[in-house]
Amino acid sequence: MGVQITPSILNADMGNLAAEVARIPSADMVHVDVMDNHFVPNLTLGPAMVQALAGATSIPLDCHLMIEDPDRWAPAYAEAGASSVTFHVEAAAAPVRLARELRGQGARAGMALKPATPVDPYEDLLAELDMLLVMTVEPGFGGQKFLDLCLPKVRRARELADRHGLDLWLQVDGGVSAETIGRCAEAGADVFVAGSAVYGADDPDAMVATLRGLAQP
Ligand code: DX5
Ligand code: ZN
């Protein structure tokens, strides 16, 4: 699939989301951060908003669920039209069952790891996933500083995926910018979330192109 740039709308103008998404026509997916005030200390939006946004753009939606009990709530986001649904393994009771359910709904199944969560215990689960998200900040807010301490895990995840011959998308999220994206790509990431770097730029779509160029292997 190659490099994919997936801007996060968390720091976009939430009152004009359809217009904000129209500013990034060359994005590969739109990253939608769902927060529930329990898994993280912030609250954003739910399936109704995802459904509305899916109707407002032809760019696939990549939903990142930072919520408790994704086993119960995640399928509603696939139902709402998300093309990819990522749950946190720290919150999931039955990640294999949930990934299979999401795939059964026709969505891509993603699993996310917070900075302190290692990837090795999940080696045997990777085959059940379409995407692994390695967080490069503690989830909850945009605009945080990139954590270099997460890069060895990106490298390790790529190694494990290669060892098993998997076509696994490897996403990084948090503090990804023109300054940090090269290090992520070099470690093996191929899907890059960028929130403040894109929406803080004068020309968000030009920043998508810049990031894409810097992420080429
Ligand atoms: C943080 C979210 C990110 C956030 C990234 O918990 O998961 O997707 O929007 O924002 P930046 O790129 O500003 O770190
Ligand atoms: Zn995110």
Image (cartoon, rainbow, N blue to C red):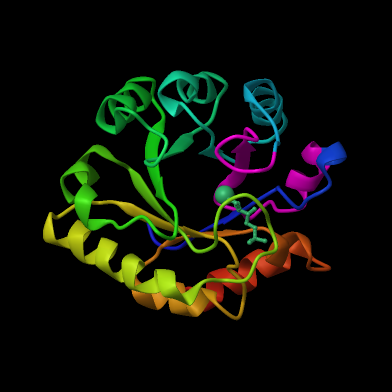
In the picture, the quarter occupied by the C terminus is bottom left
In the image, residue 188 sits, relative to residue 27, either above or below, namely: below
Q: Measuring 43% from the left and 74% from the top, which residue is drawn there? A: 149
- Does residue 17 appear anywhere in the picture? yes
Q: Position of 183 compared to 80: left or right? A: left
Nearest the camera: 92 or 168? Answer: 92
Q: Position of 56 compared to 159: left or right? A: right
- Does residue 62 appear anywhere in the picture? no
Q: Measuring 62% from the left and 41% from the top, which residue is drawn there? A: 32
Residue 154 location, x and y as percent? 35, 66
Q: Measuring 42% from the left and 69% from the top, which residue is drawn there? A: 150
Residue 209 location, x and y as percent? 63, 68
Q: Position of 200 compared to 129: left or right? A: right
Q: Quadrant of residue 104?
A: top left
In the image, residue 30 sits, relative to residue 152, either above or below, namely: above
In the picture, the quarter occupied by the N terminus is bottom left
Residue 206 location, x and y as percent? 71, 68
Magenta part of the protein: which range?
A: 17-42
Q: Position of 206 compared to 153: left or right? A: right
